[in-house]
């Protein structure tokens, strides 16, 4: 277990600055997930932590010791790669033992630790096999085994599940989470998959074009995104973003779409939005906060009548696409609601969960949910 | 099976056998002459196979010390191959992983190989006379190594490029130094390529004639040069020529036979991603 601290980290590849001033602290025993679109620098950041890439500026500290110029082998970290990186000419047992042997661990101790790691991952019966005889999931287990057997200070995962099919990915995700609970080790995990980030992380580090956009607990980021980018990146289907103006009327503030449709803001949201009256704003509402209106409206609900364009059942919920002003909006409805394209629907907006974004800066300036 | 295909198969076999005989026969003839008596060699009609196998032709080569030239070839080819493989693989690794010399160095290196030996042999001869390296093992070993290096670097560069970099990075993180990565990860991964390249490098040195002809006198004559001594103005010593040629063929034959598995894999490696 170890603590990781990064200060003012810069890294460029030729003319491209891929990391632009990263400040990050990962506490001992924490599971931090670096997530972001491809090219955002998350893998590069992980590789600088591993020592596989040099840095141009800033410091990286593991347990208070600066490791900028420390070789990868002396950082006491273990890394799991996307393509498993198993040695094809060694059997499973030798693959797992590789790191221990490289560090001259006594052979009896090596054998004992290889067996216990293999048992923990349920691959005890495969020790004599070669990687080419293993399935994708088994290979990934071996790769993880090779990491945990060393009992390192820090675990680094570089998109370890992206080569697996969907079902196996779910399974391995739970296993990694369980492993983290059992080992209570500090883990840093890179993924582009927001579901993986949400389910695994103690803390999500959301990156965008070489910078950290927001850091926080998964639900914190989901409920109270700091920027338009964060709001759009987390959540599936994506958050609905509507362009319009903020207007004041007799009863308080309202969001007015381009076609004049008006959505009244609840007091909580309005309180933070006064400075933006008569200016253009972006309203964000997640699909699960827009539903089919029921007889009894909630306290912050605003109902609108519109036509259904598209119906997409997923089994547990059904997603309905409808039109509001010039934007398509997605609402989440009951799976068994009888809905057809072309029919009219009364949509209830839960404005208590809405956010308001300044379209120029992209910053969220008002959250419906109280802090 | 239709009539055309029934006919096609025997025809194909017949063609294959004819081609095989065409190419195998000279080798057979060489071997068989080396076991013949002088009378059998010059008899007409030719003796297709000798009545009895006799080793007199070989015995003469060993008795006169001529067979020692095969040993010379073996020493020169083995040591120069070993040095070229070690140096060349390290150079190739550096070219691939550290981008040494940028894009063009690798092409420049292989271009050195395109130079015809005859173009440089006389300047080298003069240099060697000045250095006192003519007719020495180290003189020829250095020359063969220098000539093989571009080929080894070029070939090994291709094989090393195929090694997934994550394997090396994983080893670095797991506690290996660069040298250990080279030894424990890169060498096992390119093993087939190493053997294939080594065989070709060895064969080049083994078959060299022009360098050995100009740069040896009496001490380190190779078997290829020795064979030419049996062509005389008055007569050719066919028995000796055949026996010496067989001695020179056998090591290569054994090397290729034992390495065949690696050769096929090494040559085809990199052609398709596997």
Image (spheres, rainbow, N blue to C red):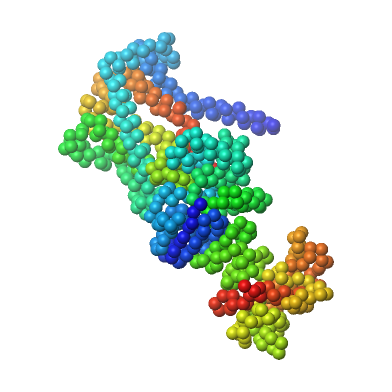
**Which residue is located at x 61 percent, y 80 percent?**
A272
**Which residue is located at x 58 percent, y 30 percent?**
B12
* Res A370 visible: yes
Residue B33 in the figure: left or right of residue B164: left
Residue A359 in the figure: left or right of residue B183: right
How far across and how far down the image is residue B231, in percent? Answer: 28, 23
Quarter of the image with the C terminus of chain A is bottom right
**Which residue is located at x 68 percent, y 83 percent?**
A254
* Res A307 visible: no
Total marks placed: 0
Q: Quadrant of residue A243?
A: bottom right
Residue A25 in the figure: left or right of residue A197: left
Q: Is residue A319 above or below residue A163?
A: below
Most distant residue in the left direction: B130
Residue A260 in the figure: left or right of residue B113: right
Most distant residue in the bottom direction: A250
**Which residue is located at x 55 percent, y 79 percent?**
A360
Q: Is residue B132 above or below residue A23?
A: above
How far across and how far down the image is residue B226, in percent? Answer: 28, 24
How far across and how far down the image is residue A323, in percent? Answer: 72, 75
How far across and how far down the image is residue B51, in percent? Answer: 43, 9
Could you say which is closer to the camera, residue A72 or residue A329?
Answer: A72
Could you say which is closer to the camera, residue B87 or residue A250?
Answer: A250
């Amino acid at each position: 277990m170890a603590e990781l601290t990064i200060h003012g980290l810069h890294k460029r590849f030729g003319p491209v600055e891929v990391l632009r001033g990263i400040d990050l602290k990962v506490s001992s025993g924490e599971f931090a997930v670096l997530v972001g679109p491809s090219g955002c620098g998350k893998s590069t950041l992980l590789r600088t932590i591993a020592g596989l890439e040099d840095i141009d500026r800033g410091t990286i500290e593991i347990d208070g010791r600066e490791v900028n110029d420390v070789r990868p082998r002396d950082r006491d970290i273990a890394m799991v790669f996307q393509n498993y990186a198993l040695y094809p000419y060694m059997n499973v047992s030798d693959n797992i033992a590789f790191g221990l042997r490289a560090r001259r661990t006594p052979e009896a101790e090596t054998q004992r630790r290889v067996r216990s790691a293999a048992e923990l991952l349920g691959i005890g019966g495969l020790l004599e096999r070669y990687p080419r005889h293993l399935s994708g999931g088994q290979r990934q287990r071996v790769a993880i085994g090779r990491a945990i057997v060393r009992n390192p200070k820090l675990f680094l995962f570089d998109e370890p599940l992206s080569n697996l099919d969907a079902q196996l990915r779910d399974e391995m995700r739970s296993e990694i989470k369980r492993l983290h609970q059992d080992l209570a080790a500090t883990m840093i995990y890179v993924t582009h998959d927001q579901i993986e980030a949400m389910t695994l992380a103690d803390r999500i580090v959301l990156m965008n074009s070489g910078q950290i956009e927001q850091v926080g607990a998964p639900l914190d980021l989901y409920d109270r995104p700091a920027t338009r980018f964060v709001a759009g990146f987390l959540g599936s289907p994506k958050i609905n973003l509507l362009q319009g103006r903020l207007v004041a009327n007799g009863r308080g503030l309202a969001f007015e779409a381009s076609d004049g449709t008006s959505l009244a803001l609840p007091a909580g949201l309005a309180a933070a939005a006064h400075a933006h009256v008569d200016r253009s704003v972006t309203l964000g509402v997640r699909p699960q906060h827009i539903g089919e209106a029921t007889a009894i409206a909630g306290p912050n609900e605003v109902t609108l009548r519109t036509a259904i364009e598209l119906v997409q059942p997923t089994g547990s919920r059904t997603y309905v696409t409808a039109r509001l002003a010039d934007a398509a909006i997605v609402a989440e409805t009951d799976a068994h609601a009888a809905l057809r394209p072309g029919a009219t629907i009364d949509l209830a907006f839960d404005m208590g969960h809405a956010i308001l974004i300044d379209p120029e800066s992209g910053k969220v300036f008002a959250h419906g949910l109280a802090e | 099976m239709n009539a055309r295909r029934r006919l096609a198969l025997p025809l194909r076999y017949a063609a294959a056998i004819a081609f095989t005989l065409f190419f195998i026969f000279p080798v057979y003839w060489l071997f068989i002459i080396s076991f013949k008596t002088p009378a059998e060699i010059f008899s007409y009609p030719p003796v297709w196979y000798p009545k009895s196998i006799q080793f007199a032709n070989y015995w003469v080569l060993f008795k006169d010390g001529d067979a020692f030239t095969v040993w010379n070839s073996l020493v020169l080819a083995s040591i120069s191959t070993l040095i070229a493989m070690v140096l060349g693989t390290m150079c190739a690794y550096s070219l691939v992983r550290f981008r040494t010399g940028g894009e063009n160095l690798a092409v420049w290196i292989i271009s050195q190989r395109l130079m015809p030996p005859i173009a440089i042999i006389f300047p080298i001869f003069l240099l060697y006379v000045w250095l006192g390296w003519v007719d020495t093992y180290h003189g020829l070993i250095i020359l063969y190594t220098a000539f093989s290096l571009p080929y080894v670097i070029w070939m090994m560069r291709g094989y090393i490029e195929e090694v997934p970099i994550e394997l090396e990075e994983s080893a670095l993180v797991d506690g290996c130094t660069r040298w250990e990565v080279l030894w424990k990860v890169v060498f096992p991964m390119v093993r087939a390529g190493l053997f294939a390249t080594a065989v070709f490098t060895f064969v080049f040195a083994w078959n060299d004639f022009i360098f050995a002809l100009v740069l040896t006198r009496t001490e380190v004559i190779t078997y290829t040069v020795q064979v030419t001594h049996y062509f005389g103005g008055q007569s050719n010593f066919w028995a000796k020529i055949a026996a010496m040629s067989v001695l020179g063929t056998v090591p290569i034959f054994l090397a290729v036979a034992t390495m065949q598995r690696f050769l096929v894999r090494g040559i085809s490696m990199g052609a398709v991603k596997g």
